[in-house]
Image (cartoon, rainbow, N blue to C red):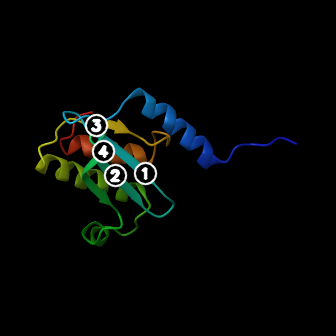
Amino acid sequence: MVSKESRTKVRLNKHKRIRNRFSGTAERPRLAVFRSNNHMYAQIIDDSVGNTLAAASTLQKEVKAELEKTNNVDAAAYLGKVIAQKALEKGIKEVVFDRGGFIYQGKVKALAEAAREAGLEF
């Protein structure tokens, strides 16, 4: 019988490999993305200190009010704009994109492209 690792385990292993390659600094923090079945979360993190500089998710009232659904590509794109605006308000222009072990397509790609359009560079 063939046994496969769960998708969660595979994603976490990918994420560990990705995180070994880069980390966020004060000059260029890390934009970390997590998506669950119902929501998306984005954080801008300075790993040298361990601080979250900005965060946004589809759970926040002001974000959720603008969305019809919280788990589709449109919601991800809106979240990308919101996190980019919060970062620019704090003076952050350049980030390192951390896709969290997720495949760069669909919601993750929509969030990244919307953040780029809103002014973040990565």
| Camera-side mark, 1 or 3 | 3
The amino acid on which the numbered mark 3 sits, given as a three-letter code, is Ser
Q: Earlier in the sequence, mark 2 or mark 1?
A: 1
The amino acid on which the numbered mark 1 sits, given as a three-letter code, is Phe
Mark 4 touching mark 3, by CB under 8 A? yes
Mark 2 touching mark 1, by CB under 8 A? yes
The amino acid on which the numbered mark 4 sits, given as a three-letter code, is Gly
Q: Earlier in the sequence, mark 3 or mark 2?
A: 2
Q: CA distance from mark 4 to mark 3?
A: 6 Å
**Residue bearing the label numbered 2:** 42
Is residue 106 or residue 63 the one in the foreground?
63
Q: Residue at x 19, y 48 (%)?
A: 87
**Residue bearing the label numbered 1:** 34
Q: Which of the labelled discs sits on residue 48, or is there none?
A: 3
Q: CA distance from mark 1 to mark 3?
A: 20 Å
- Image-quadrant location for residue 9: top right
x%, y% of residue 82? 23, 55
How packed mark 1 is, by other alpha carbons closer than 10 Å (few <14, some 14-19, many 20 or more), is: some
Q: Earlier in the sequence, mark 1 or mark 3?
A: 1
Q: CA distance from mark 2 to mark 1?
A: 6 Å
How packed mark 3 is, by other alpha carbons closer than 10 Å (few <14, some 14-19, many 20 or more), is: few
Mark 4 touching mark 1, by CB under 8 A? no
The answer to whether residue 67 is above or below residue 35 is below
